[in-house]
Amino acid sequence: MKKYILTFLLVICVFACDRNRLDRDDKSTIPLTRSEQAYAEVSKDFASELLQMYYDKKGEAYDFVFSPISLQMFFGMLGAAASEEQATQINGMLGYEGASADGINSFCKKVLETSPKLDPKVTVEVANQWWLNSATGFQLYPAFAQMLKEYYQVESETRDFSEESMYEITRSWIKSHTRGMIDFGCPPPYPRQCILANASYFKADWKDPFDQESSVSGDFTREDGSTTQVSYMTRLFDKAELYQDGTLQSLFLPLGEGAFQMEFYLPQEGKKVQDVISALQAGVFPKKGELGTTDVYLPSFDLLCKNPAIVADLTNHFHVSVRDSDRSPAKYPLCGEDREGVGIEINDFVHLARIIVNEKGTEAAAVTMNFKVSMGPGLRFFHATRPFVFIIREVSSGIVFFSGVYAGGCQ
C-alpha cells in the first residue's frame, strides 16, 4: 500500500482537482483550510486504491460501484473510538497518516455541513447512526456521544437488539436515507453492543441533459471480446470537456449547476481498465481537458453491488487488521461500554452501493454498516462501447462521492 501524506474522507473515490482545471462560473466551494485541502488532495490515493482492490477480486473488468465517502465516514467515526494501534492502522488505510483525531473530525464535519448546500440543483445527503443495545446495557461515554453529535450529526438511539423489530428499524432507516434506492436491513444475529451505519445519497440532473428520443441500442464489447446489447445515450455536445492520451480518454460532464461532475475514463483501443486504474493511481487526474464539439455515446445503466466480504478485502489489500488475524473482533474501547465493561467489538460489516445513470442525470446511494460520427471539422468522439471507469466528484475539493467500473453486465 502506498504511504500517504494526509487524506480525507467521505466519497466517494477521491481524486483531487488540478489547479489547471477549467474555471467554473459556479463559485460554490467547500471552504477548506490548508490542512483540510491536504486531506482532500491526498485522499485520492484511498479512492484509487479502492478501485484497484475491487478490480483485483476478479483480475478483470466487471461491474461494480462503491462509495469512498461512505467508507471514510464509517471509519472516521470508528477511528475516533479505536485504540492507538487500531487508529494508526485505520488512518494509514484512509490516508490520514499523521493526522489528529480533531483534524479528521473537523474535516468530516465541514463536508457533512457544506456538501448539501453547494448546488441548489444537486441533492446530497450523508447520514450517520448508532443504535445501542439496551439488552447489554451498552452506553456511549458522554464525551464521545457529544463528539458524534457535533462532528457527525449523530443522535444515538437505544434499542433492545433481542426484538425482531431491529431488522425493520434498520431497514426503514436505510431506505429513508437512500431515498428508497437501497432496501436492506441489518439481519440477526446482532452485535452485542451497537450497530453503526452510514448512508450516503446523491442525485443530480446533467447540466446539459441527453434526449431520450436520441438513445439507441448497440453492441458493448467486454474485455474478453464478447459483446452484449446495451442502450446508449447519445448527444452531439457543442462544448464538452475531453482529455486524451495514449492510455485513456476522459470525459467530464457537469451536474446540476456545475458544483459536481461525473467523469468517465475510457481505455484507448488496445488498453484495459487496469491501465486506467494504474493511471488514476499515479495521482495526476483529473487533468485539464479541452472544450470542443464532441459526439458522445454512453450506456445507461442501473448497477447495485453488495460486498459483505469487504473486511477481508480491506485487510488483504491494505494490510490492516480491521478484524484481528485470528478472526476475533477488533476492539474499539474509547466510545463506551456495556455492563461488563466491554467496549465495541467489530467482526464484520457490509458495504452496499447503487448507481443509476440515464438521459436525465445520475442517482447514487451507499450504505456501510457493521453486523455479525463524421459531422464536420473539429469533431471529437467519446464512444464508451467498452468497459470504463466512472467517478462522481465535487469539483472544488476533488472529493469523490461514488466510483466504479461499468463492464456491460447491468442494464
Image (cartoon, rainbow, N blue to C red):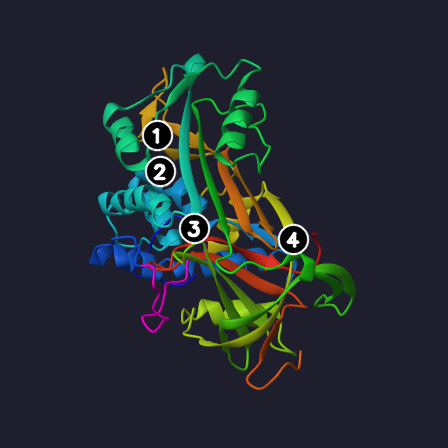
| Inter-mark Cα distance, 1 to 3 | 19 Å
Residue 317: x and y, percent? 50, 55
Q: Earlier in the sequence, mark 2 or mark 1?
A: 2
**Mark 1: which amino acid?**
Val
Query: Which range is magenta?
Result: 13-26
- Horizontally, is 31 left or right of 221 in the view? left
The local secondary structure at tag 2 comes to: helix
Closer to the eye: label 4 or 1: 4
Q: Which mark is residue 301?
A: 4
**Quick one: SS at disc 1?**
loop
Q: Is residue 136 above or below residue 83?
A: above
Amino acid carrying label 2: it is: Met
Q: Amino acid at mark 4?
A: Phe
Against 308, is 134 above or below? above
Which numbered disc covers residue 11?
3
Distance (Cα) linking label 4 and label 3? 20 Å
